[in-house]
Image: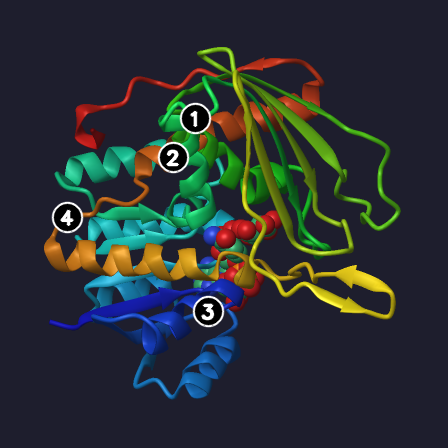
Amino acid sequence: MTLKIGVIGTGAIGADHTRRITNALTGAEVIALTDVNQEQAEKVKQSLGLNATIYKDGHELIEKGRVDAVLVTSWGGTHEEYVLAAIKAGKYVFCEKPLATTAQGCQNIVDAEMAAGKRLVQVGFMRPYDSGYKMLKQAIDSGAIGEPLMIHAAHRNPSVPEMYITPMAIHDTLIHELDVFRWLLDDEYVSAQVVFPRKSKYAHSKVADPQIVMLETKKGTRIDVEVFVNCQYGYDIQCSVVGEEGVANLPEPQALSMRKNANLGQSILTDWKDRFIESYDVELQDFINGVQAGKLTGPSSWNGLAAAVSGDACVKAQESGLIEPINLPDRPAFYD
Ligand code: NAI
Ligand code: NAD
Ligand code: ISE
């Protein structure tokens, strides 16, 4: 059976996920689209030659679209509403990060999903599907570097638009690290602090940039993450795990090394779409396969909630300048 998918939000990642379902993955087709900017949905439909209906809004798509599953790829602030609507309609839903922009929003989704009685939601945390992060996890789990003591990380984007404001450094950008470090370390956070270095002249007035986020885990591992979203030079994700017996670094993306004009160099990617292109393919194929099998195994609403609880503490720490506690509730057996 070919899975019928509806896409809510056909911007950068909505268009890219629609392309991969249509041209790269197997077992699914996009038959419904919607975007607050209808021209954008029309553009995606035409450019991919889709036999798809464009709906007035996400609710109409979920109710009338005859879809088996929904992709929520609109702006973060709209996710909760559409995920809840999909659960209510009994549809599977792949929701881009953040699952919701607050912990309460994620809790509402967790409650609705548990009431529905089975996992219907997968969150777009693609880094655990990335081969580089898998190598890091293998280095930690095998004991190759001893117990992990510290992580030094950086999340750099070349630039961000005017709509990107200070708290988005947490729930739009850092949220990837908040998820992937829990998975890498098999540990939970206990506190967060945020400090602001000198501001870059390239950062617009509503975003403090760069920021340094410091996290502590239950086992005592200390993590520092530089979030720098106007770094100009490229899209650069760094992660270095310092263990008792060695250091494991996230591999750089494969790039041609060139000798020319008395220079030895290699280019740095500039677009997040390229940096994790393979992991996006693998995560979405995993979602399609999971829906076909009636059992989702990818990042769950619980992972979305855990990241958001930590995210709320980081946003509070941005405002207070203090070390803020992180208190994750106990995980319900439903998500074991
Ligand atoms: P975008 O701005 O390019 O696209 C968002 C689209 O959603 C726009 O076309 C907009 O018109 C539409 N939209 C917004 N609100 C809507 C609504 N209520 N109903 C229907 N359409 C609506 O944004 P982008 O970069 O594609 O990000 C979208 C989501 O994907 C965000 O949640 C973002 O955090 C996530 N994302 C995830 C990435 C990842 O690595 N997993 C990478 C980039 C984005
Ligand atoms: P975007 O602005 O390019 O696209 C968002 C689209 O959603 C736009 O076309 C917009 O018109 C539409 N939209 C907004 N609100 C809507 C609504 N209520 N109903 C329907 N459409 C709506 O943004 P993007 O970069 O594609 O990001 C979209 C989401 O994907 C965000 O949540 C973002 O965090 C996430 N994202 C994830 C990754 C990742 O690496 N996993 C990368 C990029 C974006
Ligand atoms: C974007 O939405 C993403 O998810 C990218 O992976 C991240 O690097 C960027 O900062 C976000 O805005």
Q: Nearer the viewer, mark 4 or mark 2?
A: 2
Q: Residue at x 76, y 49 (%)?
A: 231
- The image quarter containing residue 185 is top left
Q: Amino acid at mark 3?
A: Asp
Q: Amino acid at mark 1?
A: Ala
Task: Judge left or right: residue 187 versus residue 31.
Answer: right
- Please count the marks in the image: 4
- The image quarter containing residue 336 is top left
Residue behind label 3 places its C-beta within 8 angstroms of ligand 2: yes
Please give the residue where the numbered disc 2 appears in the rendered image. 138
**Is mark 4 in CB contact (under 8 Å) with mark 1?**
no
Whichever of labels 4 and 1 marks the residue nearer the N terminus, that label is 1
Whichever of labels 3 and 4 marks the residue nearer the N terminus, that label is 3
Residue behind label 1 places its C-beta within 8 angstroms of ligand 3: no
What percent of the width, then of the height, locates residue 46? 44, 87
Q: Give the distance between the C-alpha atoms of the residues marked 1 and 2, in whole angstroms.
A: 8 Å
Q: Amino acid at mark 2?
A: Gln
